[in-house]
Structures are given as C-alpha cells and as structure tokens.
Image (tube, rainbow, N blue to C red):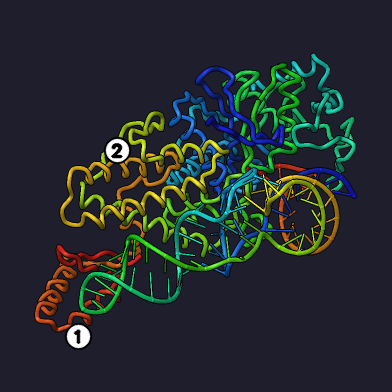
RNA sequence: GGCGGCAUAGCCAAGUGGUAAGGCAGCGGUCUGCAAAACCGUUAUUCACCGGUUCAAAUCCGGUUGCCGCCUCCA
C-alpha cells in the first residue's frame, strides 16, 4: 500500500510519487495577516500539518513551505483605519498566528516566507511574463493575459467563456479580457510601495505564491495545498503565471481542504458566525478542538457545533483516562524522539500499525484512523481489567506496546501530546479553587463511615464532593478522586 | 446562468461492487454496599427517493428531491 491523495487537478485519488526519491516539497497557502485566525484557518493548517507529520513518519524528507501574505488590500485598509503601519499590523497578526496555531500543536513549516520578502523575485517573474508575452502593462498596472495561456481554467475545471466575470463586481476597464488579473498594482498614496520597471507599486495577490514556490521548491514540485476556496481564482492564476514564466509543471498534486461551517453556513464576517481560534479555545481544550477538526475527512465540509465538539471531548476523555490508568500500572510514558511508522509491527498478530497506515494512505482518512485508536484503547482497557492487581511480564509488554502504538498514531495526528494529568487539569481549569488536603480529609472521613457501614454518611460526603466537582472512584486499592469533566 | 460537492442509526461519522468501522447518547448485564470507571451485550434487514446494470450495490449508471460550495477577497 502506498499513499494515495486526491488530486484536485485530475479530480481523482492518485498514487503519490515524489518527484525526487524520498524527498517531498509542499507549499501550503498560509494566511493574510490582517486579523485573528478562525477555526477554518485552523482546519487548513492542521490538515497540512497532519500531512507533513504523516509523510515524515513514513520516512520522507519533507520540505514544507507556508507563507504569510503581509501586503494586501485588507491589511492596508485596516492599518489605515487604525492609523498604524501595515508592517506593524501584519507583525501583530503573525505573532497571533504562531500563538494560536502553537496551542493547537501546529508545527512550524520549514520556510515561512512573507510576501514582502520576495518583491524582487516577483518583479523578476513579472518581467519574464512581459518578455514572454503573457503580461501587458496598462498605465502603471501590469496584467496577466489569460487568453495567452493555453489551458487557463483547467485546474479549477472551468472555461473562460462560461465564467461571468464582473457579474458581481465591476471589471477594471484597463483589462483586455475580463478575467485578466493584476500582477502589479500602481502605487496609491498612503500605501506600501516598491519601485519597479512599471513605476512604484505593489504586487498583486497571486504572484507572491508563484514566486515563493519557485524560490523554495523549484519550477516543479510535489504538493500544493490550501482551502477549497483558493482553487479559483488564486491557484488557477498561480499555476498559469508560474508555468508561463518558468515552464515546469508547477505543483504535481493539488490538495484542497473543505470548509468549516457553523450551523451549516460558511463562516463569514457578514454573517457574524465567525469563530476565532482564540475564542474557541476559551471553551474547548486545544486537543479537543484539534480532534474535532480531524474527525472528519479533510475534503468534506465540517459543521461546527458545540454538541459535536463536546461529544468528541467525551471520547478524548476516555482515551486519556485509559492512558492515565496505564501510567498507574506500567509507569509514565517515555516519548521517543521521532515518530516513525516504518517497521513498527513487531507483533504479527497485531495489525494496528498496518491498519493505521492503510487508513492514512487512503487520502489521509483521519476519521478511520481515529476509529482505530478507539479500538486500541478498548483493547488496552480489557487487558488492564484482566490483570487488575498482578501484572505479569507478558501483559506488561503488551500494554507498553499498545500504548506506544496509540501515542505514535496520536503524534501523527498531533494529538495526545500532553500527560493525562495535565490534560485533565486543563480540561477542568475553571478555577474551582479546590484544596486537595480538604478533599483527602473528606475521603478519609468517608472511608471511616464506609468501614462502619454508615452508607448514609458515606453517600452524603460523596454528594458534597460531587457538588464541588469531584468524582470518587472506589477501587481495590482504596478510593481515588478526579475532577468531573 | 456556468461548474462542483454532499445526502449512512437519536446525534457525529468511516466505508466507492461482496453483504453496514468508530465516537457520543440510550438500554440490559458484569463489577460495586450503592455509585463511578471499565468491560460485555444491545441499538440501521438497511445507507434521501425512483428506476437500471450485476450472481452480488450504501458503493456503478440514469432520473427526482433536498442541502451546500465556487464563479468577487476568502482556509
């Protein structure tokens, strides 16, 4: 079995073969830094994070590039409105991006270029397009001529003649064809600008990604990703201008993630159903949110609802509870430096790793992969139930192996990254101001009552603790307590 | 108007030709003084609807209905 990815360009799942041996170049469109990221940005970032983690676990050497668009109409507009520089505004939201994505366990890319760092490259590429006859200057603006590029529209599956350019927005009359798009915009007062052969100005949106792809990954590279909505016009345009300028094939596989909707509607500021990562994390544990975002296949729309997220939380709690119980039996988990899924199946009877790989190989079927983790957790619980008390060597090694599998799978998904104790602590961090000594004292008191078979008193103490958010569990080794989550 | 996607139990969600994963919730049981947790069993004769192909279809084909996305900045 080998990795199959759905390639938007061919509209099929295809076997993935890297351009060059064990090396893979991936470019994912990042964010425009004019505001906080929402959970849709989180989903996209997490999808490619999982892809990169998985490819690395399979032994590939991945060169992952993710950009920041730091010059753009919206940034300029907002900066002007706030009376701030675009640079400072962009930096603020880049910092916020790292903070929010970091909390969600999204790893940094290998290269995280900003558009403004590649202005020279953009001018070079635009010049090449001019030289090759794909671009024309009109005043101080430069446009890409879509009619000159054979196959324009092929990626997104549309024909020039079918598109209703300007149906919702007036077409710039300087364009020779309504679908022509801007490569270089002439400078306006109070806007960032750079000198160019066509006069001072700033780049159009699409050219930055073309240039950065080319700079870090070359004229042909393996995977280009982004949200479904970027397919057109952004990716179509990126591809057209890149191939027109550099030849090559540009991206060989196009991977697009589906949207997060809220109450079945796309998030948008105008609808007011816009949920930032930051706000979501006030309600949900980061891993709960991350689990939710990978619980559905990445290409499907994902509808965000509080109930759905809390249902998943209950599942994650169950996993962590098992891991916690496991620590009591075989000690804390020692994390290996690198996660590797190659050659993991020492036990031929146990197909967990094979099945996990099979699921992930099938166009990153994270939903199926999560199902396997739950199956494995049940196995672990079963073993723990059966050995309660006396753990022999065989059971111990089976438990340790199972746990390693769960954690390896978790690491590929970017989950199970904290200790069970920490997870539960964070999950119930509603500042209950609990005094462990006080709780222990009450448990001791209840223990006395139980010894005297004073069930009324015992149950009353338990009820009091329950009101405080503490759940008791009477086991063979005595009573333990945990926070109610 | 053009293009594309989706429809699986009370809810969430895998499954793309071989007889319905998993999670949540529910019910019954084991354990427990009672609980909690865990485990076991159970919950869709059926995959929006109607036709067709096939020995065999949730899966393929045609049609119908409903929902959604893109065509404008957007993850």
Instruction: Count neighbours of disc 1 (C-alpha within 10 A) and say few if under 14, some if 14 to 19, many if 20 or more.
Output: few
Residue at x-position 36% and y-position 54%: A378
Q: Is B3 rendered above or below residue A346?
A: below
Secondary structure beneath dot 1 equals helix
Q: Quadrant of residue B27?
A: bottom left
B22, B43: nearer the viewer: B43
Q: Quadrant of residue A194?
A: top right
What is the chain letter for disc 2?
Answer: A
Residue at x-position 57% and y-position 36%: A87
A56 with respect to A133 (left or right):
left
Q: Which residue is mark 2?
A: A335
What is the chain letter for disc 1?
Answer: A
Q: Position of residue B54 (x, y in %)?
A: 74, 46
Q: Is A41 rendered above or below residue A160?
A: below
Q: CA distance from mark 1 to mark 2?
A: 46 Å
Residue at x-position 32% and y-position 32%: A337
Q: Position of residue A22 (x, y in %)?
A: 50, 20
Residue at x-position 19% and y-position 65%: A475
B17 with respect to A292 (left or right):
right
B19 with respect to A167 (left or right):
left
Q: Which residue is mark 1?
A: A456
Circle nearer the N terminus (1, 2): 2
Instruction: Count neighbours of disc 2 (C-alpha within 10 A) and say few if under 14, some if 14 to 19, many if 20 or more.
Output: few
A174, A330: nearer the viewer: A330
Q: Quadrant of residue A16?
A: top right
Q: Is B41 rendered above or below residue A459?
A: above
**Quick check: can you spot residue A426?**
yes
**Quick check: can you spot residue A70?**
no
Q: Position of residue A101 (x, y in %)?
A: 47, 43
Which quadrant is the C terminus of chain A positioned in?
Answer: bottom left
């Amino acid at each position: 079995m080998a990795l199959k990815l759905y390639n938007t360009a061919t509209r099929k799942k295809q076997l993935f073969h890297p351009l060059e041996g064990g090396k893979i170049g991936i470019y994912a469109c990042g964010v425009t830094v004019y505001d906080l990221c929402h959970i849709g940005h989180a989903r996209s970032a997490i999808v490619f994070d999982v892809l990169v983690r998985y490819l690395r676990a399979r032994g590939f050497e991945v060169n992952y590039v993710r950009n920041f668009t730091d010059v753009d109409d919206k940034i300029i507009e907002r900066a002007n409105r706030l009376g701030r520089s675009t640079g400072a505004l962009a930096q603020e939201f880049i910092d916020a991006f790292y903070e929010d994505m970091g909390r969600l366990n999204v790893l940094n890319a290998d290269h995280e270029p900003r558009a403004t760092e590649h202005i020279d490259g953009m001018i070079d590429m635009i010049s090449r397009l001019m030289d090759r006859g794909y671009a024309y200057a009109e005043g101080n603006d430069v446009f890409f001529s879509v009619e000159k590029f054979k196959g324009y529209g092929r990626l997104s599956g549309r024909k020039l003649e079918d598109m209703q350019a300007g149906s919702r927005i007036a077409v710039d009359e300087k364009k020779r064809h309504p679908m022509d798009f801007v490569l270089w915009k002439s400078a306006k007062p109070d806007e960032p600008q750079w000198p160019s052969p066509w006069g001072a100005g700033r780049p159009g949106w699409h050219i930055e990604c073309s240039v950065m792809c080319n700079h870090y990954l070359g004229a042909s590279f393996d995977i280009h990703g982004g949200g479904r909505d970027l397919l057109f016009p952004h990716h179509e345009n990126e591809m057209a201008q890149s191939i027109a300028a550099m030849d090559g094939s540009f991206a060989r596989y196009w991977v697009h993630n589906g949207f997060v909707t809220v109450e079945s509607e796309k998030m948008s500021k105008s609808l007011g159903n816009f949920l930032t990562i930051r706000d979501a994390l006030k309600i949900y544990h980061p891993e709960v949110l991350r689990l939710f975002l990978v619980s559905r296949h990445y290409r499907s729309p994902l509808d965000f609802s509080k109930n759905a997220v809390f249902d998943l939380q209950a599942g994650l709690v169950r996993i962590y509870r098992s891991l916690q119980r496991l620590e009591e039996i075989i000690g804390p988990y020692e994390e290996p430096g690198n996660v590797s899924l190659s050659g993991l199946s020492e036990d031929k009877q146990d197909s967990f790793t094979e099945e996990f790989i099979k699921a992930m190989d099938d166009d990153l079927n994270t939903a199926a992969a999560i199902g396997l983790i739950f199956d494995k957790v049940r196995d672990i619980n079963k073993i723990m139930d059966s050995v309660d008390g006396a753990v022999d060597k065989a059971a111990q090694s089976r438990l340790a192996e199972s746990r390693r599998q769960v954690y390896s799978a978790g690491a590929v998904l970017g989950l199970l990254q904290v200790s069970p104790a920490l997870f539960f602590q964070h999950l119930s961090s509603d500042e209950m101001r609990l005094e462990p000594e006080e709780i222990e004292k009450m448990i001791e008191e209840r223990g006395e009552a139980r010894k005297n078979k004073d069930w009324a008193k015992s149950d009353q103490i338990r009820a009091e603790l329950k009101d405080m958010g503490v759940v008791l569990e009477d086991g063979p080794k005595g009573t333990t307590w945990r926070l109610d989550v």
